[in-house]
């Protein structure tokens, strides 16, 4: 998915704005910084995007300097998460159903026109990954939407062809096949 440089910069910028974001009413907020040169613009500031950036960095093989930077960022993230736990969980509960709708929308578009949508799968499946990453902090929302997610997973399985890891090969060990099965293949 995103490069190491992008994810490190995204986390650095996000952590600088995270407390204010947690206390705001915004679900998707704009980061007030530019992505590193040559990289796409930063994704919106959301808990899901922050958790995905962290997860991707945990998957990559980092050099010694990157490991130190990541450890410092992860410590800061966990400190904010602990300090603002109620606000964090409230934001996660709001984001979870939004991500679920986004995922359902993509799967619906795919079912209506698979030949036009199949190539979008490697990007769109990030919504399903973010749902998994948000579950711990959005338990109430996850339970309320459990049946819908199960139904969407079953619909996906009908057109899913198991195969190679759909994202960068260097990340595959961080997304085990038995948990993140939807990253190990493509839709027809």
Image (tube, grey):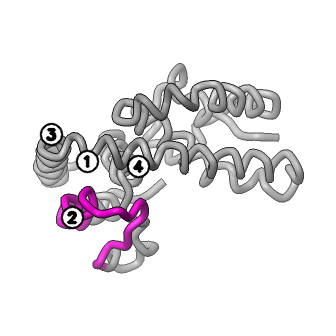
Does the CB distance between marks 2 and 4 fall below 8 Å? no
Question: How packed is label 1: few (under 14 Cα within 10 Å), some, or many (20 or more)?
Answer: some
Residue 182 location, quadrant: top right
Q: Secondary structure at mark 2?
A: helix
Residue 14 location, quadrant: bottom left
Q: CA distance from mark 3 to mark 2?
A: 15 Å
Question: How packed is label 4: few (under 14 Cα within 10 Å), some, or many (20 or more)?
Answer: many
Choose the circle earlier in sequence order: 4 or 3. Answer: 4
Q: Secondary structure at mark 3?
A: helix
Q: Nearer the viewer, residue 151 or 122?
A: 151
Choose the circle earlier in sequence order: 3 or 1. Answer: 3
Name the residue tied to disc 3. 82
- Residue 10 drawn at (x, y percent): 30, 63
Judge whether 70 appears above or below 27 on screen.
above
Choose the circle earlier in sequence order: 4 or 1. Answer: 4
Name the residue tied to disc 2. 20
Q: Nearer the viewer, residue 35 or 108?
A: 108
Q: Nearer the viewer, mark 2 or mark 4?
A: 2
Name the residue tied to disc 1. 87
Choose the circle earlier in sequence order: 2 or 4. Answer: 2
Does the CB distance between marks 3 and 1 fall below 8 Å? no
């Amino acid at each position: 998915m995103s490069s190491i440089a992008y994810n490190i910069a995204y986390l650095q910028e996000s952590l600088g704005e995270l407390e204010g974001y947690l206390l705001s009413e915004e679900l998707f907020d704009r980061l007030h910084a530019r992505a590193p040169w040559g990289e796409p613009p930063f994704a919106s500031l959301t808990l899901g995007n922050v958790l995905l950036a962290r997860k991707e960095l945990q998957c990559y093989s980092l050099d010694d300097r990157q490991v130190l930077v990541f450890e410092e960022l992860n410590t800061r993230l966990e400190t904010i998460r602990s300090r603002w736990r109620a606000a964090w969980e409230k934001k996660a509960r709001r984001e979870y159903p939004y991500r679920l709708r986004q995922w359902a929308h993509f799967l619906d578009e795919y079912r209506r026109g698979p030949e036009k949508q199949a190539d979008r799968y490697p990007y769109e499946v990030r919504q399903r990954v973010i749902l998994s990453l948000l579950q711990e902090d959005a338990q109430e929302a996850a339970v309320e939407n459990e049946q819908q997610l199960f139904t969407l997973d079953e619909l996906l399985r009908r057109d899913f062809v198991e195969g190679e890891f759909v994202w960068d090969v260097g990340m595959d060990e961080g997304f085990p096949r038995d948990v993140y099965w939807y990253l190990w293949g493509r839709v027809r």
